[in-house]
Amino acid sequence: MAHRSPRADGLRNRARILEAAGQAFAQDGPDVPLDAIASRAGVGPGTVHRHFPTKQSLLTAVVAARLGRLADRGEQLAADPDADFYEFLAELAGEARHNLALAEALGGPASVEADEAGQRLAAALASLLSAAQQSGSVRPDLTVGDLHAIITGALTMERRLPPDRHGIGLQVVMQGLRNW
């Protein structure tokens, strides 16, 4: 039996589910019930289960999509190595700060789809880091692995700050990355 392409309505439903799940996971973390996601997407629970048999498969798809979008953005930057590096780092941290599921995923994706997107993101970050180091604006002794650990630490710091102080931790960290 030949494999059929997904129907247009199925693709739309999948996109609505991913969007709704992304918002729900970002707000409430990975424990949000699938029925709440279905309701938010305007579809029935059965539709969610047809596209994503488990909550983990839905979470993985959401994380992979976010990582993929961030990788796309990182791959597009190339005009100004100094500004691009810091802009992308701030964008990455800002996205993760407001997205509990993504923040957890930055510790290491757990699926092939998320691993591929994570590898693209790491490559984009490595390219931006290398260009910024070559231009002299970023410390030459940093590696991408160091940067992942630093971002994770900065996100932990940001979560502990009162809401009116969000951003100060990241500013301090970014100053420490500069090559003085």
Image (tube, rainbow, N blue to C red):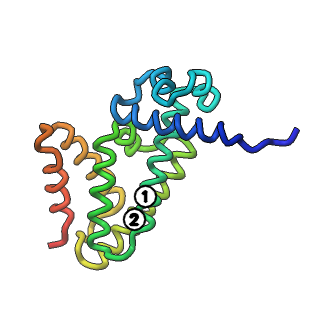
Label at residue 56: none
Q: Position of residue 3 (x, y in %)?
A: 80, 42
Q: Which amino acid does label 2 sit on?
A: Ala
Asked whether 138 or 70 is in front, the reply is 70
Asked whether 130 or 26 is in front, the reply is 26
64 up-or-down from 101: above or below? below
The answer for how far apart the CA atoms under marks 2 and 1 are is: 6 Å
Q: Position of residue 136 (x, y in %)?
A: 24, 77
Q: Residues within 10 Å of mark 1 (few under 14, many from 20)?
A: some
Q: What residue type is labelled 1?
A: Ala
| Residue at 51% from the left image edge and 38% from the top image edge | 18
Task: State which quadrant residue 103 falls in.
Answer: top left
Q: Where is residue 116 in the image (x, y as percent from the top left)?
A: 54, 52
Label at residue 122: 1
Position of 81 with respect to 114 (left or right) is: left
Pointer 2 residue:
126
Do labels 2 and 1 touch, CB within 8 Å? yes
